[in-house]
Image (cartoon, rainbow, N blue to C red):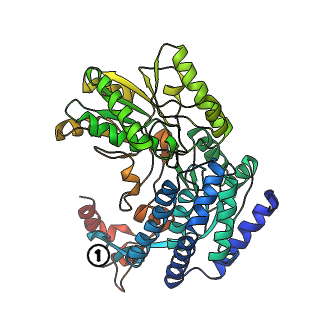
Amino acid sequence: MSEIPNAATLDATLAGLRTAWMRQRPSLPQRRADLQRLRTTLKARLPDMAQAIAADFGHRSHHESLLADGMAVLSEIDHLLRHLRRWSRPRRASPGWRLWPARAEVRPVPVGVIGVIAPWNYPVNLALVPLATAIAAGNHVLLKPSEQAPQTAAFLRRLIAEAFPADRVAVVEGDAEVAAAFAALPLDHLVFTGSTAVGRKVMAAAAANLTPLTLELGGKSPAIVCADYPHAQAAARLATGKWFNAGQTCIAPDYVLAPDSLLPQLVEALRTQVHERYGDFSGPLPDYTRIINDAHYRRLRQAIDEARARGAEVIELANVDPARAERERLIAPTLVLRPPPDVQLMQEEIFGPVLPLLGYRTLDDAIAFVNARPRPLALYPFSRDRRQVERILEGIVAGGVTVNDSLLHFAASGLPFGGVGASGMGAYHGRAGFDAMSKLLPILWQRPRSATDRLKPPYAKIDRLLRWLVR
């Protein structure tokens, strides 16, 4: 076990990274070599990665780890390598005819040391994707994995030590106190992924140094199913989005709005999905992930019990032996019909395999329901009528959207990923992340002759010229 860092050791680690960066800023060939080495090292250790994540969760689907934490990182690195040379070039800009004959450009330049505070739910993906993006942009990186996934944090520490020199990428481990000290460091940019409540604390800590932030937070991401969309297909796609990683996904559908008459059919279609995917929950369930820890398991149980006590209909879509549920932190896919708006399930991000279903009379009612709450990280409209989809897109501001499916916009490297309002600020993935972790430096190149040669007092000499320019 590594020694838990204190504020002094964090400062020293940051100073070492910054000194090395100032001494030799990473060239484009070095960035490419670093990304390729990270890719090779991770690919060789995917079994170790999946084992570490499973140890932290108690059980995590091996295939979900390979897809969401392995393939996702490798795919993002490939995207960075494919586009890095083009993104790094100066970008032509117009100086405007008034500054003729000058020319202008915007040059992406690295900023220094990027801090990354990663969460536990996708502990490799959400650590290494921003790390790789920062490397691509020419920065050094200080990484803080989640203390709630200690086995994965140790895996990341070993992986990083093998892939990078210690003065290029450093990993610090520790609890929430260490994370608070980390956020208060004078970093050149900080990427935080986590809850909205913790995001507020991170932003407050970073404010003292005016550290630029990318905050990837959470929220209650709605799915709106319209009457024209086939309910069985909607159920299948919602099931994937909600039960992947047992719902412990920041962009999982957090509640579903559907026409009142469609709710019974949607319930039965979701019940069918459970049976087809997992059986009757009596066996080992290799493809169903457990809840990360006892605290989150109790939180979810209490939220379900509260909704039931307040009159909501709770439908557990599979029977689980109570002793096994407690022992394995196992919560079967659960539907909650028409919960009151003030219960915990409708006030906080659920982060578990529990899905509230609410009815609506008109599409405008559904849009108004979403808009009465903080802006979501993700939005999932389901309709084959383009006009209805456009009404939803025009009526709701969200961090990102997948139409007629769930989760998939996160996997599109060409799309920026980020929240809005309470669900976050800034974006990364692909070029959006490269630009966020660079300084887009504006440069004006002046020619030997310039109009400013005449712009000097006494201005009466160029009065006619000035009048013409301002006209």
Most extreme residue toward the front, as rendered? Answer: 283
Instruction: Give x and y (percent) for residue 401.
Output: 34, 46
Q: Image height check: is 127 above or below 222?
A: below
Quadrant that contains the N terminus: bottom right
Tell me which amino acid carries mark 1: Trp
Residue 170 appears left or right of 467: right
Residue 277 location, x and y as percent? 41, 43
Q: Is residue 249 above or below residue 15?
A: above
How many numbered tags mark residues here? 1
Residue 322 quadrant? top right
Q: Position of residue 336 (x, y in %)?
A: 45, 24
Mark 1 is surrounded, within 10 Å at the Cα level, by few (under 14), some (14 to 19) or many (20 or more) other residues, namely: some
Q: Quadrant of the image for the C terminus? A: bottom left
Relative horizontal placement of residue 245, taking residue 404 as reference (left or right): right
- Secondary-structure class at tag 1: loop
Q: Vertically, is 81 above or below 269?
A: below
Q: Identify which residue is drawn at 54% across, 24% down.
A: 304
Q: Residue 34: name its quadrant.
A: bottom right
In percent of width and height, residue 157 lies at 68, 66
| Foreground residue among 134 and 241 | 241
Residue at 56% x, 70% y is 42
Q: Nearer the viewer, residue 447 or 1?
A: 1
In the rendered view, would you say 32 is above or below 391?
Answer: below
Q: Residue at x 71, y 49 (%)?
A: 180
Q: Can you see residue 144? A: yes
Residue 398 visible in rendering: no
What residue do we see at 67% from left, 36% from top? 295
Q: Which residue is mark 1?
A: 100
| Of residues 282 and 190, the one drawn nearer to the viewer in this rendering | 282
